[in-house]
Image (spheres, rainbow, N blue to C red):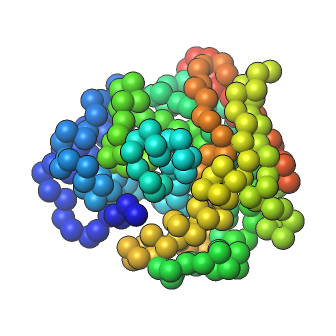
Amino acid sequence: MPTPPTADAPGAAVRKAADALAEAARSGVPCAPVRDLLADGDVAEAYAVQRLNIQRSLTGNRRVVGRKIGLTSPAVQRQLGVDQPDFGALLSDMAVPDGGLVPAGRLLQPKVEAEVALVLGRDLPHPQCTVADVLRAVDFALPALELVDSRISGWDISLVDTVADNASSGLFVLGGTPVPLTAVDLRGVAMTMTRGDEEVSRGTGADCLGGPLNAAVWLASVLAEAGDPLRAGDVVLTGALGPMAAASPGDAFEAHISGLGSVRVSFALDEGEIQ
């Protein structure tokens, strides 16, 4: 299980890695991998980098509105040599409306994946969370698109790099019709995602850690153990149901998830294009 961030003051290596990622986000120029700045394979340090940059970014009305789960696919876990998912924070200015337009330059190296989103109606404070706890806590489910991104050049990432980079978070899009869990079998849902007229991804709920509820149980347990539990109102992106697809200016994506409906997003061709 990956080690969540702690309250310890960040050391020099953590600050240096956080500075590199923050500058890449500010300038729009991806940075070199940060894994060489941190202790070899130290996921706890990577979460400290993530937490430091999130804390730095919470200015004005910007706030944490939920969490995302990454590395839920067994194939991706094997690729990175890990056997557990990771997580990142969702911030209020990362939300894009259904059918919305992502401005040119808003993301550095975007890719798109389709997911099930859960919106909580109750807190999940227990470290040993169960499926029953999640079922009671979830208010409704929605189809979602996660627009993942990397501040690291060429997506040259290890587990440490992606954790430090807020689990390669970018933006997210939620569908607009809430569905109660009593009306859908999340493990059995089928997903197709298109880019224009081309199908670019396909999968099922079972492809996400055996089911999106399993992913939510894992996340709730890890965060509660760290003393930062999921709260009522939080959005949880439970992980990709199929392969991610690269996005270019002018692309339009739509995902359909059986029982939940559809969700769409487009990428602007140039900086002058408006929604």
* Quadrant into which the N terminus falls: bottom left
* Quadrant into which the C terminus falls: top right
Between 109 and 213, the one lying in front of the other is: 213
Between 6 and 265, the one lying in front of the other is: 6
Q: Identify the residue shown where x is 39% and y is 24%.
A: 154
Answer with left or right where residue 68 lies relative to residue 261: left
Name above or below for residue 215 compared with residue 106: below
Q: Position of residue 8 (x, y in %)?
A: 21, 68
Q: Position of residue 113 (x, y in %)?
A: 63, 39
Answer with left or right where residue 38 lies relative to residue 124: left
Between 228 and 92, the one lying in front of the other is: 228
Between 116 and 211, the one lying in front of the other is: 211
Q: Identify the residue shown where x is 41% and y is 30%.
A: 155
Name above or below for residue 11 compared with residue 80: below
The residue most toward the left is: 12
Q: Position of residue 126 (x, y in %)?
A: 51, 82
Q: Is residue 57 visible?
A: no
Q: Is residue 6 visible?
A: yes
Q: Identify the residue shown where x is 63% and y is 26%.
A: 267
